[in-house]
Amino acid sequence: MFEAGFWALGSGLWALGFGFWALDSGLWTPDNDLMETIRNFCIIAHIDHGKSTLADRLIQRCGGVEERQFRDQILDSMDIERERGITIKSNTVTLLYDAQDGRRYTLNLIDTPGHVDFSHEVRRSLMSCEGALLLVDASQGVEAQTVANLYLALEYDLEIVPVINKIDLPSADIERAREEISEDLGLDPYEAVLSSAKLGEGIDEVLEAIVQRLPAPTGDPQAPLQALIFDAQYDSYRGAVMICRVKEGTLRPGQKIRFMHSGKDHAVEEVGLMQLERVATKELEAGAVGYVIAGVKTLRDIAIGDTLTDADHPAAAPLPGYKEAKPVVFSSIYPMSTDDYEDLTDALEKLSLNDAALTFEKDSSTALGFGFRCGFLGLLHLDVVQERLRREYGLSLILSAPSVRYHITLESGEEISVDNPSRFPDPAQISYAEEPYIKASIMMPERYIGTVMELCREKRGSNTTFNYLAVGRVELTSELPLAEVLFDFYDKLKTITQGYGSFDYEVLDYRPTDLVKVDILVNTEPVDALSQLVHRDKARTRALKYCDRLADTIPKQQFKIAIQGAIGGQIIARKTINAYRKDVTAKCYGGDITRKRKLLEKQREGKKRMKIVGSVEIPQEAFVAVLKSESDK
Amino acid sequence: MIPAAGIYIHLPFCSSICPYCDFSVVKGSSGTRAHFVESLTDEIRICAGSVWPAFVGTDSEPSFDSIFLGGGTPSIIHPDQLHNILDQLEESFDIVTDPWIAMEVNPEDVTPLQLSAWKELGVSYLSLGVQSFDAQSLEFLGRQHTPGQARESVEMAKAAGFPTVSIDLIYCLPGQSQGSWRSELSCALDTGPDHLSCYQLTIEPGTGFDVRKKQGRLSEISIDQQAALFFETHSYLESEGYTAYEVSNFASDPRHESRHNQKYWNHQPYLGLGPSAHSFSGRSRWWNHPGLKQYLAAVDLGGRPIAENETLDSWQICLEAIALGLRTPRGIDLEDLPGNRGPAIWHRNQAVLHRWVETGLIDADPPTIRPTLKGMALADTLSRELDIPMD
């Protein structure tokens, strides 16, 4: 559901865990005493402009990896990333390049995750670079998203090298691409390097440009240590492996380090460089990018963006830009079969070792039994976690409707946060409620502006403005409640812009809202798993939608079933399922009672999977049907 | 004491195959029929020599007090051949004096001569495959007789003095209204049957109707209409003096009830012979090959033509007893349930039973649970919902 239109700061799929460096360890002798032979850079590109292919070529050129080995490696990477064409976990790799000037350079290619849900990680990655390759597709030209990416990179003062890629395509128009680089990006078009990553053309030129045009890092190896953790991986033997950029000072084994934000101290066990395999080194000096293992058990124990310093000679202040990755989207996850609860617990614990942004706590529902209330960075993150639970752990799940976290001020003056409808206080005690707003940035061809503005209005958007990025391309910004974006916004946007619209957002602030809790009642019994918090204006439509879907999926039973949507005692939507009066088959079975019994046994099995609310049997398919997002329909 | 057992003989021949029928039937030449009767008598002999100890699980043999000649169309089998079959049964098994013998016949085969031959065989329950008294419906059902023949056949059978004359009817036909069904029932009652079996049309896989349904040329009537016709059947026949002793079976007097079919519903043992016939020993079930060829091949080799068998555990017997019991007004006798589950079922299901009593689905009078007509109509749901403890 998310793939189309999202800009990708990173779609590199060349993952880790591959030991080709071992083939020729003689290669592995960088001049790493010399800071001026280090280049830290990333590749920014619109999705599909060839970023992963270029990355692959750079690695191959520097490491001599066979084509076939690459394929193997790509196949090993996370299915979900490949399918969606985005990178969820970023990977970093150190390359050694023997440049034309006769020196051996250490090139740290820092990959960046490619989705707005993970924008804090993107920023952290950019902070670790001095430069970026800006990839432009020779046949597509500069896309609106490319501009946004450029601005983000410029925010961090990165030096930019434009690369016009895919020059081998028959539709390539290099001159037009140059023009656009000049007009839309304000960069010197004749500095652009021409390449065809697919054919391996221009790769040397790209490498030379990195060496010659991107600045070397700066920093003092003797200064108090400041190292920015911009990524981390989980190793089942070693625990958390932190990937960091040493800004000042030196990191070495045995050193006592301190996490400046969390205040925890650890002893460094190992430092080294990230090749496709980890290669230990004796130290990491200012300017270097590498890994640190320091006896940290899980990814939960560290925070991306935290600064490492020397506990004995601490730096005066941490590096700027630290922001805790806070979940903004919440949903309860229940196993389809209550027997799978233990497995779900296990799976979530394992997943969270690798995914520090995922939060979870026990939750329970009368209808669905025990489950977990989980917090996610965004809808994509939710989707990825759900997919991983299904695919990697083979679990069948029911997810409650995603919710944002509301701030509620009670009459007593007490302020509470609520992201679970079951914790919604008595409305009489509420003084006022606030909900999170985002600043949405939608880029699209001009012709869709009318319908997109209408969509924003429908989604309670305010301060909607737009400006022309180029002839025919418009960027629209709107301040929208995040909750509205969670409910069929992406899909509508995709539909009305025929796939051309792209979407990015940042969380703005909390604003007053008229919040109500909508309950769904089945024969007057509330189905707790279906309750949701919504804006009063949306309550009726939302309730009706749920009632309709339930009425379509709950089978007729021996009594009439009323399905209602309610705010407190007030009924706002209603559907009825009529009773059936007969189910017995007045058929002649003769002596074949077996057939009859087997049918009954099967039905009784099916009944076990039913959830009982009051006296009504609700098949799981009904929950799945009601709770599935619009896009799954 | 071993309850009296029943014998079912499946005679798989019909002069034409009806589009709703999913029983084991073929047209079969007279040569095939003769071959079959030979094989059937062989099967009886083989069975008598091998089956009994396993059949009841004791050393003593049961005696049989009912024989059901079903099919297929037994009335197209020559009375002499039927005679041979019955003689062989007599010879091989312990059959009570004057057993209850039922025979299914098609109206178009009924003549005074045939009737007297069947009477001669000792048939006491003549089941007429009328299915409908409406010309259009008969044509739809692929039957070979007319409404006139249907009426005459019943009247002739009555006149011939069979102790019980029964009519089979099929309802829930596409487009059938309560009114038209009621007038058919009224036609049926005009002929004065002692017993009626009113079955609901169901479209079974592999039948002619199934093909039509898949082609979109036929659809079953709505569940609401099925319910309406079901209740219409029961209330009308009840008002005319017929008692429903099972969801589909009605008798003007208890002595006209089908002795054989009740064995199916009461978990009494029965032995099925002929292709596709099912047998039950009280604990296990087995059934013969449904295909005539396979059946003949097996018997001709001197073996038993059994396709599959199963041994029921006491939970399964209990489930069946409940499911079958709820299809009859007699209901369930909790004290009779295997494994002494009655008290547990009673206590575990208090809330459910209470609700059913309140909504008029059952009368609960421990140790019996009797469905009302409303409850019988929901027998499948009720037997699905009862919590039955495992061993």
Image: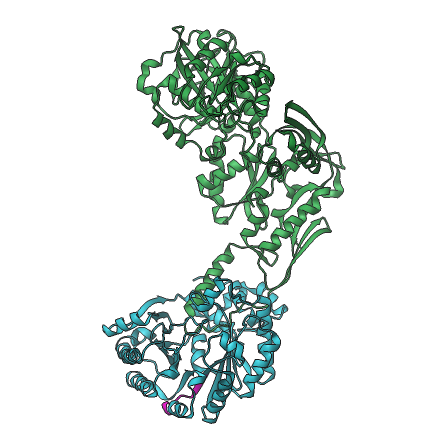
Chain colours: A green, B cyan
Position of residue A240 relative to residue A100, above or below, is below
> Which image quarter holds the N terminus of chain A?
top right
Quarter of the view holding residue A377? top right
Taking the spot 59% from the left edge, 25% from the top edge, the residue there is: A144
Position of residue A566 relative to residue B24, above or below, is above
Quick check: A69 left or right of A143? Answer: left
Q: Where is residue A210 in the image (x, y as percent from the top left)?
A: 47, 13
User: Does the magenta portion include B91?
Assistant: no
Quick check: A625 left or right of B309? Answer: right
Q: Would residue B66 be seen by someone viewing this image from the given angle?
A: no
Q: Where is residue A195 in the image (x, y as percent from the top left)?
A: 45, 18
Q: How many marks?
A: 0
Taking the spot 47% from the left edge, 8% from the top edge, the residue there is: A212
Q: Position of residue A404 (x, y in %)?
A: 64, 36
Quick check: A425 left or right of B54? Answer: right
Q: Nearer the viewer, residue A549 or A301?
A: A549
Residue at the extreme front of the image, as rendered: A170
Quarter of the view holding residue A505? top right
Q: Position of residue A74 (x, y in %)?
A: 40, 30
Q: Would residue A63 be seen by someone viewing this image from the given angle?
A: yes
Residue at the extreme left of the image, as rendered: B301
Magenta part of the protein: which range? Answer: B120-127
Position of residue A578 relative to residue A48, above or below, is below
Q: Nearer the viewer, residue A216 or B173?
A: B173
Q: Nearer the viewer, residue A561 or A446?
A: A446
Q: Nearer the viewer, residue A368 or A25?
A: A25
Position of residue A351 relative to residue B229, above or below, is above
User: Does the magenta portion include B126?
Assistant: yes
